[in-house]
Image (cartoon, rainbow, N blue to C red):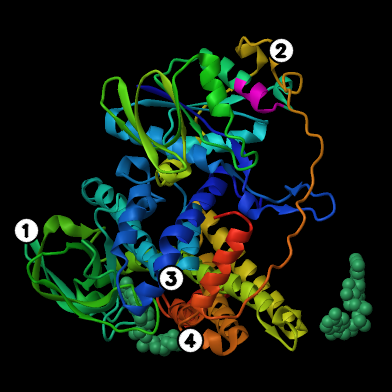
Amino acid sequence: MDFKLNKKEELFLQMIRDFAENEVKPLAAEVDEEERFPIETVEKMAKIGIMGIPIPIEYGGQGGTNQMYSMAVEELSRACATTGVVVSAHTSLCVAPIFENGTEQQKQKYLPKLCSGEWIGAFGLTEPNAGTDAAMQQTTAIDEGDKWIINGSKIFITNAGYAHVYIVIAMTDKSQGTKGISAFIVEKDTPGFTIGKKEKKLGIRGSATCELIFENCEIPKDNLLGKVGKGFGIAMKTLDGGRIGIAAQALGIAQGAMDETIKYTKERKQFNKSISKFQNTQFQLADMETKVQASRLLVRSAAYKKDNGMPYSTDAAMAKLFAAETAMEVTTKAVQFHGGYGYTREYPIERMMRDAKITEIYEGTSEVQRMVIAASILK
Amino acid sequence: MKIIVCIKQVPDTTEVRLDPVTGTLIRDGVPSIINPDDKGGLELALSLKDLYGAHVTVITMGPTQADAVLREAYAMGADRAILLTDRKFAGADTLATSNALAGALKMLEYDLIITGRQAIDGDTAQVGPQIAEHLDLPQVSYLENLEYDGNKTFRIRKATEEGYQILEVDSPCLVTVLASANKARYMSVRGIIEAYDKDVEVWGFDNISVDESKLGLKGSPTKVKKAFTKGVKSNGEVFEVDTEEAVGIIISRLKEKFII
Ligand SMILES: Cc1cc2nc3c(=O)[nH]c(=O)nc-3n(C[C@H](O)[C@H](O)[C@H](O)COP(=O)(O)OP(=O)(O)OC[C@H]3O[C@@H](n4cnc5c(N)ncnc54)[C@H](O)[C@@H]3O)c2cc1C
Ligand SMILES: Cc1cc2nc3c(=O)[nH]c(=O)nc-3n(C[C@H](O)[C@H](O)[C@H](O)COP(=O)(O)OP(=O)(O)OC[C@H]3O[C@@H](n4cnc5c(N)ncnc54)[C@H](O)[C@@H]3O)c2cc1C
């Protein structure tokens, strides 16, 4: 067993830290404050290959690993969680399902442009009445011979408006239940497809979260992703992979909060000494650091299993559950250590606390992760 | 065009601390990086490659760990990498270093040789100009901008203390570059993945024809007599006065010391 990064991973980490520190961190507060999608950062990331890390070179990817991809999401989120989720939703929820389920023609058509970052990707599963219970899909896709007609709507879709390619889950045969659900590739500007209301959010405020509206939206026959009736399985498998990305995002947020808190508690003096000299501070920091490191090992282990073709769903669920709850706990305590200053926007720590919360909700709430883990141990 | 960039691995001095007792650098746990001016030099080479097409070779002299900076250069886009390493090169001062590097450069083809202005762990700014002398090449130091006519001539802005000079020089030549000349690109993800699959050529004493007496410790006339930590200056005087009065005080003090 080897807990060491290999040389490529070390070099990769050096680059992505450098990038996050110099290109991402300086914009984090502004992107949050102005609820602004960091498009210029996406362009910079595209240039160096961050939008297609785990995809083979033949499809325009970088030929990297899921380990590198999760390291990228961690380091980006350590500086700015918004930037982390832009990459994570794009890679895990759009690029990956096309790579894993697409026909050769679909892969050739979509992957090079997505991996180069010319196009951004998104994934639409959630509906007003289909959240945790994702099988309750009301969006329909009707087979019209040479085309599909989609009707319905999606909510809370990350990257919406900025994305060019959307993976859309819809009901093709209600009588079949989850076996009547299929997945489709929908391009922006398709007639009948519009972007609806943009959400105002607690955290990750720079990321775009919008409604997708389909009104007799016609898409070509070729845009079915995978087989008819296999959409629910595709969506669930996509989320398994995505959870590694969100776990990495949570880990990055927690690490970012640790960085700030270690620095602050050493600098801040009360009662004539640094607050880091108080045993309460030390013990809590020790617990926080331990949980962050445990999260990292869970994330690395899940990514390792995915890279090596081993079953990883339960590992991904554990990584996401633990990392997300760690992020929430660590950022909340981090604000406490910053006192009143931590509550203000002069310091990045309140943003990190707001950003952390979403990691317990999307791509399966913490309750859902517990269901997945319990099902795997009780089967 | 064939370009060779000399890069040095240095400790990241922004993270170096001094041992308060011995006054020496604590190198333990300090990350090694490409010397910042050399990174500027590599960026200059790669941008010429982007614009005009060029073959970029990077060379470093150092211990085997210096391989890391060559991998980084590959990941940024260099085409060929040479590690110059031999026990006979150890303990070199700037002269012995430039002898070894010039010996290696003589074995290679080039139109342009690029070095950094100076290394952050030595700060002498001597190796670049010394190489140019050994190879009998025209040199321009302190480069902050370069334009190429696409044929033979470089138009260079050279930084001086007062401002700058514009100089024209024909290839082959040597330039020493400032980190501030450009913003070095990031390594690309694909470049990183491929960097360790590429070959780094390892050259030793036998690959160059330089007299042994000119290399390593033997070839180094510089002798370190003593290393010491500069004494801490006193705190200075603090005047809590308004701006106008403060300006008056500063001017009279500067006059007292004949600075103005
Ligand atoms: C910022 C943001 C971005 C998002 N991005 C996307 C995206 O890109 N694509 C996409 O498809 N969706 C996206 N979502 C949707 C997200 O995945 C859902 O919000 C999430 O799955 C929860 O669904 P819900 O909001 O309907 O909550 P509900 O399902 O209504 O859940 C409410 C609460 O009940 C609990 N609960 C529900 N069922 C059970 C049960 N059986 N047992 C125990 N507890 C249960 C939940 O855990 C939760 O605590 C995003 C959401 C947000 C807020
Ligand atoms: C089975 C076993 C194996 C061990 N193996 C090793 C070993 O291999 N190497 C080794 O060096 N030591 C070893 N130890 C010793 C162990 O590290 C110490 O027991 C431990 O550091 C606590 O110190 P103490 O026993 O003096 O506890 P006490 O001082 O008696 O502490 C009792 C309680 O007081 C509190 N406390 C004590 N110190 C502090 C403090 N600084 N801050 C806050 N609360 C405090 C804690 O709540 C602690 O539980 C071992 C102990 C045991 C029981």
For the residues labelled 3 and 4, the Cα–Cα distance comes to: 18 Å
> Is-magenta flag for residue A283?
no
Q: Amino acid at mark 1?
A: Asp
The residue lying at 61 percent from left, 64 percent from top is B253
- Asked if badge 2 and badge 1 are on a common chain, one would say no
Number of the label disc, if any, that sits on residue A212 = none
Q: Position of residue A108 (x, y in %)?
A: 24, 45
* Disc 1 and disc 4 in contact, CB within 8 angstroms: no
Magenta residues, start to end: B92-98
Circle 1 or circle 3, nearest the eye? 3
- Asked if badge 1 and badge 4 are on a common chain, one would say yes
Left or right position of B201 against A110: right
Left or right position of B242 against A224: right
Q: Which residue is mark 4?
A: A344
- Asked if badge 3 and badge 4 are on a common chain, one would say yes
CB of residue at label 2: within 8 Å of ligand 2?
Answer: no
Q: Which residue is mark 2?
A: B212
Q: Which residue is mark 3?
A: A81
